[in-house]
Amino acid sequence: MGEFLNIKPLDYRDVLKKLPETKHLLLGNGFSIACDPIFDYGNLFEYVKQNGLSENLIKVFEYLGINNFEGVMRLLDDAIWLRGHYKLIYGKRSEFSMEDDLQTIKEALVKAIAQKHLAHSNLIDRRRRDQCVSFIEPYKTVFTTNYDLLLYWIARHGSEKLNERDGFRASIDDPAAPYLVFHEHLGDQKGILFLHGGLHIYIEDGEIRKHSWKRTDIPIIELVREGLKRNQYPHFVAEGNPDKKLKQIHSSGYLTYCLGKLERIQQALVIFGLSLGNSDQHILNAISDNLLLERLYIGIFGDPNDLKNKSIIQSTEYMVHRRKQWLVKMKRGKELSIEFYNSQTAHVWD
């Protein structure tokens, strides 16, 4: 492990003392699991597969990416339209039905959301929500790789303190619409960005839209379920393959903007609950290649010498090495200063 042998993680309170005025936060799945174990999604595809996916549907997933739910549903939807438009005829319906497969994946995803997500924010004690608001408050930009609704709920709960923007505003064409539209970059303002999309975000009529509880008085989970019935597919990336994940990101204006923002932040970044594994390669590169980002504080859980933490440290060494390569090439900038802290001392929820 070379550069990071025998590390002694800092207390999170000491991290706060070291942070400059401009600081940002990156949250991974550990943020959600620390709130409630129900958010330990594991492999969402395997979970959904248990609900009975056909062999044809499994092969479509394998082709597009085994967690690319939005891509699979859109492909089937388009193929059904195209087949009808050209009046194409295929074999027996019982053997090969895109309509049945599309309905199956919708129902399976709804079941997964229902069983693997809290129904509403009030199921989280108000004191815990307040604690999370206090944790997030010091940071300028909050990024998350999670597609669940936790950060959305916290942003709403602590809106007066956090004053975070997410770029979604009322539609210019339909100001009274029940949804919000992404059309505003954050600039120098505080903000929250979903690097891999979210259950509450969807694409319709060429727009990136967001379900809104405030405009409908309907819980977001219910809006997601109702949206699926109207072919409003959640816009999120749960893919494990790094190349396919990056391809999905670059196919979306919103996700491309979010990743680009990570590539442009300045001074310091704190990471909480992110494994920095192979599927996070695009994040490792974004951090390494951002020569304006000088300091990185990475949370690790438990024994620094266990297998998961050693993997995090190995990824850290990769980022340090990649940054050095950039400095040689660009002949400017600073090396990436990295320290670790004990994530349990952050007390995000408790």
Image: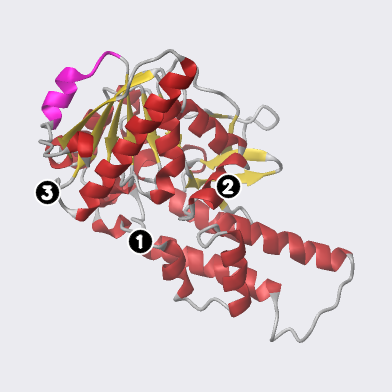
Q: Nearer the viewer, residue 317 or 210?
A: 317
Mark 2, Cα crowd under 10 Å, few <14 / some 14-19 / many 20+, is: many
Image disc number at residue 303: 3
Is residue 19 covered in magenta? yes
Gap between marks 3 and 1, in whole Å?
22 Å
Please determine whether, in this image, residue 23 is positioned above or below residue 174: above
Percent x, y for residue 50?
44, 76
Q: Quick check: 324 left or right of 337?
A: right
The residue identified by callout 2 is: 248
Residue under numbered circle 1: 42
Asked whether, in this view, residue 205 is left or right of residue 244, the answer is right
- Which residue sits at x=70%, y=80%? 96
The amino acid on which the numbered mark 1 sits, given as a three-letter code, is: Gly
Q: How many numbered tags mark residues here?
A: 3
Q: Name the element at disc 2.
A: helix
Question: Pointer 2 and pointer 1: residues touching (CB < 8 Å)?
Answer: no
Q: Quadrant of residue 90?
A: bottom right
Image depth: mark 3 or mark 2 in front: 3
Secondary structure mostly taken by the magenta-highlighted segment of the chain: helix
Q: Secondary structure at mark 1?
A: loop
**Near-viewer residue (218 or 246):** 246
Rendered position, 21 above or below 126: above
Label 3: state its secondary structure: loop
The numbered mark at residue 184 is none
- Mark nearer the N terminus (3 vs 1): 1
Q: Which residues are magenta?
A: 12-21
For badge 2, the amino acid type reads: Gln
Instruction: Choose between 94 and 164: the one closer to the eye.
Output: 94
